Amino acid sequence: MEKEIREGLKELAYNLWWTWEPEVRKLFRSIDPILWDEVKENPIELLKRADLRIREIVTDKKFISKFNYIYGYFQEYMNKPSHYRERFKKPIAFFSPEYGLHHTLLIYAGGLGFLAGDILKESSDLGFPMVGIGFMYPEGYVKQRINKDGWQEDNSDLIKKENMPIKKLYDNEGNWIKIYTYCYDEKVYMGVWKAEVGRTPLYLLDTDVEENAPHNREISSKLYIADSELRLKQMMVLGFGGIILLEKLGIDIYGIHINEDYPVFALLARILNFMKKGMPYEDALEKTRRTSLFTTHTPLRSAINVFPMDMVKKQFGFIKEKYGIDLSKIIELGRSPEGEGLNTTVMAMRLAGHINAVSKKHQEVTKNMWNFLWEEEPPIDYVTNGVHLPTWICEHLRTLFNKYLGENWLDLHDKRSLWELVDDIPDEELWHVHIKNKENMIIHIRERARKRWYKEKADPSLLTAFGVFLNPSILTVGFARRMTSYKRPDLIFTDPDRLARIVTNPERPVQIIFAGKAHPADEEGKEIIRRIFNFARDPRFEGRIAFVEDYDEQLAHYLVRGVDVWLNNPLPPLEACGTSGMKASMNGVPHFSILDGWWIEGYNGENGWAFDNTNPAESIYEILEEKIVPLYYDWENGGFPKKWVRLMKSAIKSIAPNFCARRMLKNYIDKFYSRMVE
């Protein structure tokens, strides 16, 4: 019995289904609650370190019963029939440079990655056949440390792959599967890892293998390398390597969906692969276009990848020899009318027969950016982003929904009519759940500050800025996202004295929590962090401003369900979509945002607050002072703000069905994937 339970626990630990199924997490926690917290909710590390405890607990009848139930539920989930698998006999290959699935798998940087991760999770839940292709980054993304001057220090955290929910992929002879492609005239080898995302496989390419020279081993070392030559190599490895891997594994696909331009060479590699099998170039190009989707997220031309032609010619020198195609054809696919170098977004738009923006507003912006590529109306559609609701809904709220929406509500969560039942939830019960989330968030933030203090003997003056004075009884505003200038994280500090009066009001105080990383090369973003951090330890704000360092997926979960208001004020129209506000609203946290990205579609006048860019800082102050603060502190008889709770319910009802990943993936299936079936 012990062996079977150990094997079952290991199987559960290596399938990321547990990251969105709370009962599995409770099972792991029950093994050793203290160790579970110590290993940051990593079941693989837990099982390695709790060997003696497992020997004891596998004889406990209650644990055995719980394990049998959970494992049986897992088997039922994995084998659940799906009409999509009947309709789609072959998978769609989804290529992305990053995947945000859980903080135990550090292969993500931000929103683009979490979108990709949520798509894979939802494909698993729906039973839609999909296979993911990405990178295994041995250094992950930077860990953020704020020094005593308020400056972000970038520390690479070397990943312990043995503690991550991934496994090497072996062939029938027991050898680690490795493939290669060309970068310049060199063979670059990649070892293959596999992550199980429920029923959806994710294959990760790793150039840190002994067959490669040192300069090639670092190709997949970390996300978004600034060096353009190394960046081009990354794109080659992801695109060509991914197609070669699919061929190696015998995975026949209907088509390819590339998440941004980073995997664009997968489309080129597919053309060359068809040609290698005897298909003429024009036919291969046409088939690739018909079966390819390019999702663009970038509303700014300056952020587009453009590579010098001499670098491109050297990089693609193998094309003529290996595939017999003239290099000029490749170059023309990515050359823009301005005559610049190889523009990989232009190449993606010329190779993909289907193109989509990530919100209705972003579609308009994208068409204006790239209209010169077409003589007629640009054929750019849109699918507004969504988030994987089972991942982002907190456990307490899920329990409440089980009680009042029915135990099968998750199967119907993209149906608007279901969410009308939220009105049946007693106001006091919903408020109690929110306060519990708020208290847990503040405990977590204080614990982070405590660890920084005792591990590094950090300057006590830093602790104020880290949030040790946060109070769960005070109206709390959250702002957490990538720290870059167009997001305008410090906009609310336009008039520091006025803000100080708002946050230190003795009768109706406000506190604001900031979190987010700047890209290592973004000096302006780091300066914004420094400015906010120094405001956070400015005595005139009385400890009511906090900057929580090292924003990650775990902290995001605490923030989107624990703050009272989610603030967003980017410079329009540079917010292609945004998703953090969706996660907050689904948890009953109203969105307070400028009208850009998804909020143009989401705002209905009753589920949050909106303002335009005419005088954004003034609008933030006015709405806070005249609407948000009075409503929050309007506590009627009964000891909680009933009108505020009605606002929370409006947020949940309007956002959950319309901005969930299920609605998003169904849009992709109906608009694009269905048209790839042959």
Image (spheres, rainbow, N blue to C red):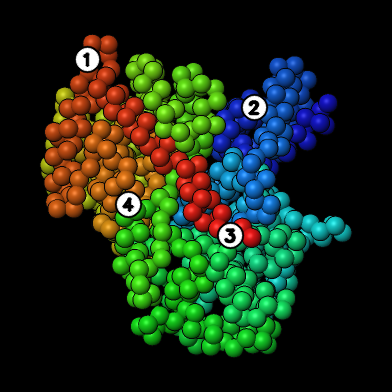
Give the residue type at disc 4.
Gly
Give the farthest residue toward the top.
637
Residue type (three-letter) at the residue carrying disc 3: Met
Gap in angstroms between the C-alphas marked 1 and 4: 36 Å
Q: Is residue 541 above or below residue 443?
A: below
Q: Which residue is mark 1?
A: 636
Amino acid carrying label 2: it is Leu
Choose mark 3 or mark 2, whichever is in front.
Answer: 3
Q: Which residue is mark 4?
A: 597
Three-letter amino acid code at disc 1?
Glu
| Residue 490 in view | yes
Disc 3 and disc 4: Cα gap in Å? 28 Å
Mark 3 to mark 2: distance in Å? Answer: 41 Å
The residue under the point 74% across, 21% down is 64
- The Cα atoms of the two marked residues, 2 and 1, are separated by 40 Å
Q: Nearer the viewer, mark 2 or mark 1?
A: 1
Q: Which class describes the residues within 10 Å of circle 4: few (<14), some (14-19), or many (20+)? A: many
Label 3 or label 4, whichever comes before in sequence order: 4
The secondary structure type at the circle numbered 4 is loop
Q: CA distance from mark 3 to mark 1?
A: 57 Å
In the image, residue 306 lies at what x, y percent?
43, 76
> Residue 330: x, y in percent?
54, 82
Marked residue nearer the N-terminal end (3 or 2): 2
Q: Is residue 512 above or below residue 435?
A: below
Q: Which residue is under mark 2?
A: 27
